[in-house]
Image: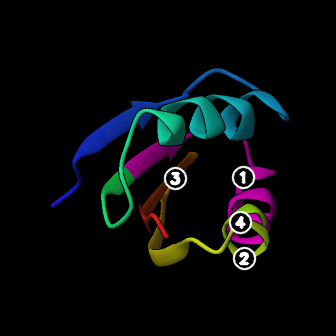
């Protein structure tokens, strides 16, 4: 169950990652954040961001033109 949901629908690279970074700053280690995006680049960018920052990408789903990510913070 996410502690926070961030809907970045309608934004384009690099906005989803920038907004995610800002949201993460307000959360604590172990918290989970759900990111919703309509930017196809998110499918590539979010996993790379999580890997680089040490966060755990729990789940990544795609439904038509909407992408959802569940991330557990390090």
Between disc 3 and disc 2, the foreground one is 2
Residue marked by disc 1: 42
| Callout 2 crowding tier (Cα within 10 Å): few <14, some 14–19, many ≥20 | few
Residue marked by disc 2: 51
- Foreground of the two, 37 or 70: 70
Between marks 2 and 1, how big is the CA–CA gap? 14 Å
Left or right, 73 with respect to 11, comes to left
Q: Earlier in the sequence, mark 3 or mark 2?
A: 2
Left or right, 74 with respect to 27, comes to right
Disc 2 is placed on an element classified as helix
Above or below, comparing residue 17 to residue 71 in the picture: above
Percent coordinates x, y for residue 66 in the rendering? 52, 46
Residue marked by disc 4: 53
Between disc 1 and disc 4, the foreground one is 4
- Foreground of the two, 22 or 48: 22
Between marks 3 and 2, how big is the CA–CA gap? 25 Å
Above or below, comparing residue 44 to residue 25 in the picture: below
Disc 1 is placed on an element classified as helix
Q: Earlier in the sequence, mark 3 or mark 1?
A: 1
Pointers 2 and 4 in contact (C-beta within 8 Å): yes
| Callout 1 crowding tier (Cα within 10 Å): few <14, some 14–19, many ≥20 | many
Q: Tell me which segment is drawn in magenta.
A: 34-48
Between marks 4 and 3, how big is the CA–CA gap? 28 Å
The residue drawn where x is 28% and y is 40% is: 4
Between disc 2 and disc 1, the foreground one is 2
């Amino acid at each position: 169950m996410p502690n926070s949901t961030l809907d970045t629908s309608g934004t384009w690279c690099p906005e989803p990652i920038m907004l995610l970074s800002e949201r993460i700053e307000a959360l604590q280690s172990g918290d989970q954040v759900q990111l919703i995006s309509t930017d196809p680049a998110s499918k590539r960018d979010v996993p790379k961001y999580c890997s680089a920052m040490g966060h755990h990408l729990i789940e990544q789903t795609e439904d038509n033109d909407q992408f959802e990510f569940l991330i557990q913070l390090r």
